[in-house]
Structures are given as C-alpha cells and as structure tokens.
Image (cartoon, helix red, strand yellow):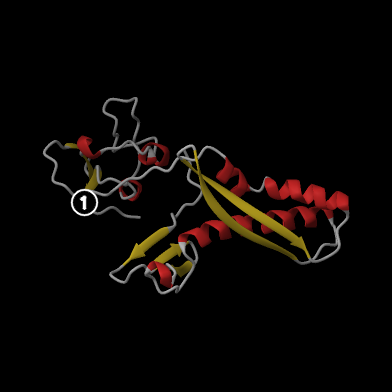
Amino acid sequence: MEYLFDKPVQGSIGVQPYKITIAWRNGSFVSDEPVKSGGQDLGPDPYTLLLSSLASCTLATLRMYIDRKDWKIADMEVNVNMYQTILSGNMETTIDRDIKFISPVTEEQRKRLNNIAANCPVSKILQGDIKVRTFTQSDADIEKKLKYANDDIAVVWKPELCKHSARCVSGLPKVFDVNAKPWINVDGANADKIAEQVSKCPTGALSYEVIKETGK
C-alpha cells in the first residue's frame, strides 16, 4: 500500500460552525456550508469540492491530451452538477458533466475528447469500487501494552486499539512485519525514522519513547 500523497490533506475546525480549514501540500483554504445550512458561505461546501475535483481533473486531462496531439484547441469550460434519487430504497447519485470547447473542434476530435474526459483519473475513482476507511485517535490508557526497545527508542503497542491500517507495515516494513515474531523490530531502522512512522498511526495503538537522543 502506498498513499498518493506524502502529506495527507488535513481538515480542522474550531467552534465556528461550519468553517473548516483545509491544509494541502502547498497552503490552505476555507471550506464552509451555505447560509441556508447554517454556515456563512466563506468557501466551497463539501459537494462543491467533490464536483470541483472532477471538473479540474477533466480539464487537466483534456489539456494534456490536446497538447500531446498538437491540436489547436485553446479555451475549454466544464460545468458539473449532480442530483440524487431514491431507487428501490437505495440512494443513487448522478453527476452530469457538460464540456464546452470555446475553440472550433471537428466531430472526430469531439468524440475522442469525450472519451478522454470520461476516463480521467477522478472519473475512474468515482465510478470504481471506493472504500472509505475511518480511524479515530485514542489516548486511552489501555492495560495491555507491549514494549519493544533498544538503546535508542522504545515502541509501545496497545493491541486493543490496533485497527490494522497497514500504514506502519507499508511505511517501514523492515521494522513492522506482521508475519514475524515479534512483529516489531526496533533494530530495523534508526530511531528517527521509527518515531516518524509511529507518529502516523491513526488510532494511537503505537507510540514511542525516546531513550536517548540520536544524531541526525
């Protein structure tokens, strides 16, 4: 398992409803709910953000393809909207994407670009098999703890909190190996790397204690 981003997209909220700060790799922006929903409309709402990801992916994919073909197609626009219906007790979501070419295009180009847009990466995600995993951080003082230590660092594992997200295994396989006994080998990497990886545990099942400062 390898994540798309080295640094995850992070959302945070204070006491003001429903103003949310979204931090990404190069800055931050505000998301909010419209006034009719109790917000102040200070930024795009979650549905708008979802549709904007499809719009931006569509246009970027089309631009890359057009440039590669060296076609003389300049400005493009895309309008994206959605509606939901209940069918046989299940919610069905339909997203409509309308693409407008400001520059002239041939019918052959239009058909080809329609297919390219339909297969942009975000389209594939939205139409694929999506799983959303949710982990919540816990600082509970669990009685059962296992400690794995060397002279530099100790890794503490609370089995009852472990949800097996696989982040530790994929991020530092020489230290975390579920097929080994013990499954945590603190000699598999230096203390700094172990501490960095343990800090990414989403549940609090893993923590660390620095035994002595290490040089970087």
**Residue 176 image point, x, y percent:** 34, 35
Q: Which residue is mark 1?
A: 212
Number of residues whose C-alpha sits closer than 10 Å to that of mark 1, classed few (under 14), some (14–19) or many (20 or more): few
Image side of residue 106 versus residue 188, left or right: right
**Residue 2 image point, x, y percent:** 48, 42
Image side of residue 28 versus residue 148, left or right: right
Q: Amino acid at mark 1?
A: Lys
Residue at horizontal 46%, vertical 69%?
Answer: 29
Between 181 and 91, the one nearer to me in the picture:
91
Image side of residue 106 versus residue 148, left or right: right
The answer to which quarter of the image holds residue 22 is bottom left
Quick check: 92 above or below 98? above
How many numbered tags mark residues here? 1
The answer to which quarter of the image holds residue 154 is top left
Identify the image quadrant of the C terminus: bottom left
Between 168 and 106, the one nearer to me in the picture:
106
Between 28 and 25, the one nearer to me in the picture:
28
Between 30 and 67, the one nearer to me in the picture:
30
**Residue 132 image point, x, y percent:** 42, 43
Res. 149 in view: no
The answer to which quarter of the image holds residue 133 is top left
Quick check: 102 above or below 61? below
Res. 59 in view: yes
**Residue 37 image point, x, y percent:** 40, 67
The secondary element bearing badge 1 is classed as: loop
Residue at horizontal 35%, vertical 48%?
Answer: 193
Quick check: 150 above or below 106? above
Residue at horizontal 70%, vertical 50%?
Answer: 117
Residue at horizontal 36%, vertical 67%?
Answer: 18
Image side of residue 61 versus residue 147, left or right: right
